[in-house]
Image (cartoon, rainbow, N blue to C red):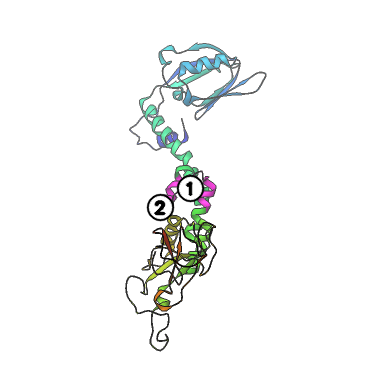
Amino acid sequence: MDRVGTLTRSRLHGIFSGDPVPALALRVTGGLWSIVEWTLTLTPDVGDPVTFDLREYSIHELGEAILAAGFGLPYEDTFAGHLGAIVLMEGSGDPATSNGDHLYRHDSLLWCWLGAVGLAFEDARSGIPLALAQMVLPDAGTIWADLFGETFGIARWPDETDTEYTARLAEEVTRKRSSPAAMLRNIRRITGEDLAIREPWKEIFALGVSALGGPHYLQGAPIYEYHTAQIVSDHGGVDWSAVTAEASADRPAGTMLLGPATHFPTLSFVSSETLLAIAFYREECRYRYARGASYGWTGTWDDRAWSADVVEFPIGPPYDS
């Protein structure tokens, strides 16, 4: 019987009988034998010991395995052959001595119950070190690592190993955030994009600070407020879904993110089938320019209408998404 079952039996009330009611189950010849907890060890006269996990056999199956291992089996209790081999009692013997080849089983219902309960508790006890290890993030794996991820709200990436995932979890929950510099640093680390953050509160008109007719604006929704911010790129092809997800996770509490915007440089060469971007700096149109999709800038102006396929890019700080 396992240690838990034995310990429990030793603490029973005195009205319970601790007698195992032993009965002969097997006789084994050909070497020494010993049973400790759930393991039967047979040591032949010549050769290496052979072990059997009693939890994996019935008494009859164990007898067959003993024969297959080269030992003798002059007796088997066929009435108890269907019982689990865990009913065999601990002990040891030498066939060279009187009755030294006898392996007994207990026939006590109390021992059966304690053995079953003890077996379950023994399995639980053996799992305690593993459970304790899984409670430490770097040691967690499989579903336990995923449980940490669910707790922190950080999903595992496709094909991410346990080691990579737990390391990223530790970094994610301890990293700096809630500032523009931290947000940009994390966006660059996660997505590889080198972007900028526009803070419209810096563009709000302030008496005694802002110049009349200058670039500052009166405070007002939805842009020029103290709790707004905007992710800005100076190039196209940005996966905004990944960027905004990271920015939303890192933004300061109460800060609302405006839609992201692409802010191309004021003058740039575009592909050969499009036009050279040009900016108009007159007050009424200084913040936008247009590039045509089909007409060139060479030659003289005529009365043809511009193509309807016109793409607009903000020249100054982007004021919308």
Q: Count every numbered label the image shows and give the total.
A: 2
Please, is residue 158 above or below residue 169 in the view?
above
Q: Secondary structure at mark 2?
A: helix
The reply to whether residue 179 is in sight is no
Asked if the magenta segment contains residue 140, the reply would be no
Q: Secondary structure at mark 1?
A: loop
Q: Residue furthest right?
A: 46
Find residue 5 and report its horizontal and vertical position in percent: 43, 34
Q: Which residue lies under the disc numbered 2?
A: 151
Between 119 and 7, the residue placed more toward the observer is 119
Label 1 neighbour load within 10 Å: few <14, some 14-19, many 20+: few
Range of magenta residues: 144-167
Instruction: Choose mark 2 or mark 1, whichever is in front.
Output: 1
Q: Residue furthest top?
A: 74
Which residue is painted at 41% across and 50% down in the image?
150
Dominant secondary structure of the residues highlighted in magenta in the image:
helix
Task: Name the N-terminal-most of marks 2 and 1.
Answer: 2
Q: Which residue lies under the disc numbered 1?
A: 157
Label 2 neighbour load within 10 Å: few <14, some 14-19, many 20+: few
Find residue 70 and report its horizontal and vertical position in percent: 60, 14
Tell me which corner region of the image, top left, top right, bottom left or bottom right, holds residue 77: top left
Between 237 and 8, the residue placed more toward the observer is 237
Q: Residue furthest bottom?
A: 208
Between 237 and 247, the residue placed more toward the observer is 237
Asked if the magenta segment contains residue 146, the reply would be yes
Give the residue type that dot 2 points to: Thr
Q: Quadrant of the C terminus?
A: bottom left
Which residue is painted at 49% across and 51% down in the image?
137
Please, is residue 180 above or below residue 294 in the view?
below
Give the residue type that dot 1 points to: Trp
Please, is residue 217 above or below residue 149 in the view?
below
